[in-house]
Amino acid sequence: MNVSFSRRITTRPHLTGGFLLAAIVTAAVAAGPAALASESSAAAGSTQALSGGSPIVWSESPASSAAPDTRSKFSYTDIKPGSVITDHLAVLNRGKQGVAFSIYATDATGTSLSNALILMPSAQTPRDVGSWVTFPTGVSRLSIVIPGGKGIIETFKISVPRQATPGDHTGGVIASVSFNKLNNRGQLVREEHRIAVPLELRVAGALHAGLQVESIATGFHSTLNPFGSGSADVSYTVHNIGNVRLTGSQSVSVTGPFGISSTVHLASLPTILPGDSVRVTTQAKGLYPAGPMNAGVQVTPGIPPGAPSLALPTGNVTGTASLFAVPWSLIGLIVLVIVVVIAVWRARGWQRRRLRAKLAAVADSARVETERRLLGDKGTAAGPQQQA
């Protein structure tokens, strides 16, 4: 497909590497250590949507003033407060019909466990790096119609406030398409599909790197086998208490009496934004429920891939919590055995009492019969003597 860009760029058929169908309502997709999410989103690259049955396919990428480049995100390091950065964004309409695009920047609100960067919904006003971005004539949101098969390169500026706090500020530059569509109930709804290029900016100044393990919760699952092992559920929050993006390795250990232990080495943490946190849940298996146990979480802070070097604090970040694992299956078996023993003992006691009663009845019957016979014999012998 031949594609032409307005103003300053030539044909570039390799701008995208495939089509991603943007989801309706809310989605989040990864783009290296960062991505985006909102009403409908896809990572920097291309996406498509259906408007009245006609496909709308477009893509977005960083660019120079003349052509798209190979960057996967906008990244700026050691920027002094008060600085102004000029950069460029390429947007390509790969469909056949003209489409109205909205181009703007917004803030990131966090990341998911799949390392997806979550961006603010379009209806919310950015307050951080997203509010620092402006397009020609100083507008924060640019509306433009791009003909089918055409692309544009737009210049934008990032004006870093003089009072900007040191550390990392994260957002995304978005190209979105909105249209009306009938849903499954026949109702007319407004859909917005967006793709974005992550925007990462580090303001110069005092940098602090730190993670903290918080809110550890535990639980235990026993098996029906009274002699089988169970598993412990451990959930915890890793909070970025510094002012730079961080990741890290993590492990969970659960120990109990009699040398019972289980250790789980989890996948690396996603990139956690300053002030943000992620909730992690894992399961330690092979634990016999033998009473009190301790769960320990250990996190080693790390620098996200592609991020600038940074002095990290030495040592690991840890957190502990206790749990009590009750061997319910074994207790149930013991109770059942006791019940059976008591039942058998009582049954045998009843049988013994019944046998004693029968023997007593036989003895009484024998005694009565003996007395009857003895008394009967005496009575027969005394009769003739009385007549003489």
Image (spheres, rainbow, N blue to C red):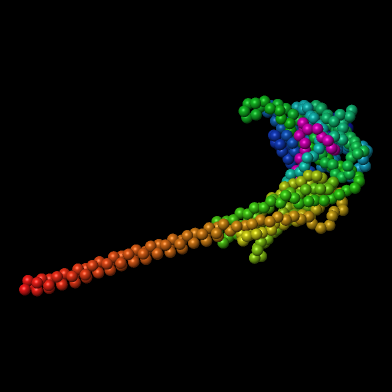
Residues in magenta, as a range: 115-129
- Name the one closer to the observer, 269 or 152: 269
Q: Quadrant of the N terminus?
A: top right
Q: Is residue 36 visible?
A: no
Q: Quadrant of residue 232?
A: bottom right
> Residue 223, position in %: x, y?
57, 56
Q: Residue at x 80, y 26 (%)?
A: 145
Q: Could one spot residue 220 in this view of the protein? A: yes
**Residue 11 shown left or right of residue 219 in the figure:** right
Q: Does 127 appear in magenta?
A: yes
In the picture, the quarter occupied by the C terminus is bottom left
Total marks placed: 0
Residue 163 falls in which quadrant of the image? top right
Of residues 378 and 31, the one nearer the viewer is 378
- Quadrant of the rendered image containing residue 76: top right
Q: Reply above or below: 115 against 39.
A: below
Q: Position of residue 319 (x, y in %)?
A: 74, 55
Seen from the viewer's position, the closer of residues 312 and 384 is 384
The residue that appears at 89% across and 40% down in the rendered structure is 164
Is 171 situated above or below 238?
A: above
Q: Residue furthest left?
A: 388
175 vs 276: above or below: above
Question: Residue 310 lies in magenta, yes or no?
Answer: no
Residue located 55% across and 60% down the image: 330
Left or right of 269: which side holds 132? right
Counting from the top left corner in percent of width and height, residue 97 is at 75, 27
